[in-house]
Amino acid sequence: MASPQERHYKLALVVDDSVMQCKVLGVLLKEEGYRVFTANDGARGVDMYIKYQPDLVLMDINMPVMNGYEAARKIKSLSKNTLAPLIFITSMDTDQAFIESIEAGGDGILVRPFSPEVFKAKIKSIQRISDLYAQVKSLQQAQQQDAELAEQLMSGVIESRNFALDRIDILKKPAELFSGDIQLTAQCPNGDVNVLLGDFTGHGLRSSIGAIPLAETFRVMTKKGFSLFEIIVQMNNQLYDLLPSDLFLAAGFVSISSSDATAYVFNAGLPDTYVYDQLGEIKHKIVSTHPPLGVIQSLLPGSKLDVVSVAPTDSVLLLSDGIIEAGNHGGEMYGIERFEQAAKLGVTNQTLGETVLYDVEQFCQGALQEDDISLISVPCGDWVKPVAVNLPPAAKPAPYGTFVELPESGALWQWNIILSGEKLAKVNPIPIAMSFIQEVEGGGEQWQNLFTILTELFVNALDHGVLGLDSSLKKEAEGFALYFHEREKRLQQLTDGTVELSLSYYQLAGSGRMDIVIKDSGKGFDHKAFLEKISTEQEVEMALSGRGIILVSQLCDQLDYRKGGSEVTASYLLS
């Protein structure tokens, strides 16, 4: 027997102990295009329902062996995934009979006597509902298949490419098959770690249509060395252009710099972001200071990153509101206080995700989960491998020796950019330079050292040469935040000043050489004074600033500061 989905005709089952009634109803049903089977008691009716899976059941109430109420209950229990319309046909014209018919699972009742026209109208009505139910069911199945495909895409393509999955603790529990939350992690060329927790409006498949372009933007810009704030600006523009007006993204961003012992945070619509120490004590709470991304075309004026100092044993926690707003059967929300208590226990036991999820589930006691649940915990230490430092510099003839010029005409190509005034505050030339280099010479890990060199030398020229910032601001742990805020303040006020960056690439036998020249219009970077301050390896290890320029000196074949430090020339050999 073909299933209801496979056959091209409709089947009806008439269950009545009266042979005459079965014949009368059978004739009327055939006039409506049904093929008809009959049974003369409830038990036989259940057996025939299992065998033929009819599209319609007509059921008498008073029958031998098994009455119509019991037979209806059994049939409905066998047809949980289909509507299986069932109409009671009876002469019992009482309220009690009507109530018991509905409670037994009946979808309608017809009381004799009735005309053939009334009977056929009732059949058409119930069949119309049945057809609509089948259409809805079909749409649900298609939606389920789409959601399963999207979930495979999200898990297998997007989130499987996340960085350091063995160290970054990610908890994800969707309210439906497909979560509207997105968790992304990626490593910057300088070793810093960028993390994003995003919570799209609502949940399910529709809520995450922006996930794929979002993930690509986050990863590509992080890989190219754009700053976290530049990534946020670009993602807000992208989401504003792509998403419908009722869909947006609450998001928390964190960039952790182990070398600076600093975390940079931007909270746009998520619950507070936390920094916990290893004892489970809260060191920082970073509140949301911006609407979710995609709501407005540009970030609010004055938007900026929160900068907090962190220790290697600290961890940064981001969470979605699905945790805070999880409810129990009494209508009570889980709330911030319960989360902080559970998080403290989880941090100290190093079981954060498990502990928080267990506590939430104990609180909810099986109540319906109405929103996606996400939690990310990122350790703050050991993201950059230690660098061997060969000091004192005075004992090292290179890279601080005389710079050996190569014939200008020997360069395979040259690239130059000059930024002045407010453009210095808005444009980061290093990702632009790296994109050009990789476009010309191809990609590869060999460019990571060059990125570090360019970034360090450019930042020194801008910060110390043009902005006049003093590195001594960083000497205390909290000094990085102070330094960062002072830098942002001076950049916003910047109206003059110039930094010029020039690259020249030479082809050598079996290798290559990149010459870098950076000039600033200010007083330059006083590297001699810096070297005098740091004279021992121990001091370098302890210092909270200046390690970058020492790393550059190790990476470069030659490094030469001129004109009081306002011009630096470096040479980097490629294997």
Image (cartoon, grey):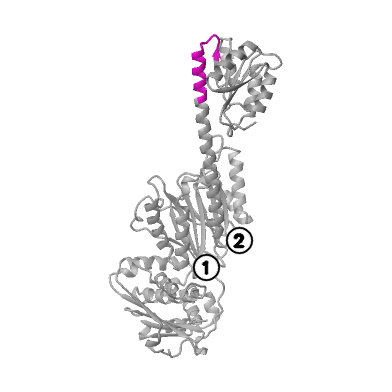
Coordinates of residue 46 in the picture (x, y in percent): 67, 23
Judge from the rendering whether residue 364 lies leftward or rightward of residue 233; answer left or right. right
The magenta span reads 110-127
Coordinates of residue 24 in the picture (x, y in percent): 58, 13
Earlier sequence position, callout 1 versus callout 2: 2
| Residue with the mark numbered 2 | 166
Judge from the rendering whether residue 101 lies leftward or rightward of residue 528; answer left or right. right
The front one of 33 and 519 is 33
Which circle, 1 or 2, is nearer the viewer? 2
The quarter holding residue 302 reads: bottom left
Position of residue 389 relative to residue 32, above or below, is below
| Residue with the mark numbered 1 | 258
The front one of 510 and 549 is 510
Name the main secondary structure of what is drawn in magenta.
Answer: helix
Position of residue 101 relative to residue 279, above or below, is above
124 inside magenta stretch: yes
Residue 480 visible in image: yes
Position of residue 463 relative to residue 228, above or below, is below
For the point 47% across and 45% down, the residue is 206
The front one of 544 and 305 is 305
Residue type at mark 1: give it. Answer: Ser
Coordinates of residue 169 in the picture (x, y in percent): 58, 57
Coordinates of residue 399 in the picture (x, y in percent): 48, 86
Residue 502 visible in image: no
Judge from the rendering whether residue 429 lies leftward or rightward of residue 77; answer left or right. left
The front one of 575 and 479 is 575
Element type at marker 1?
Answer: loop
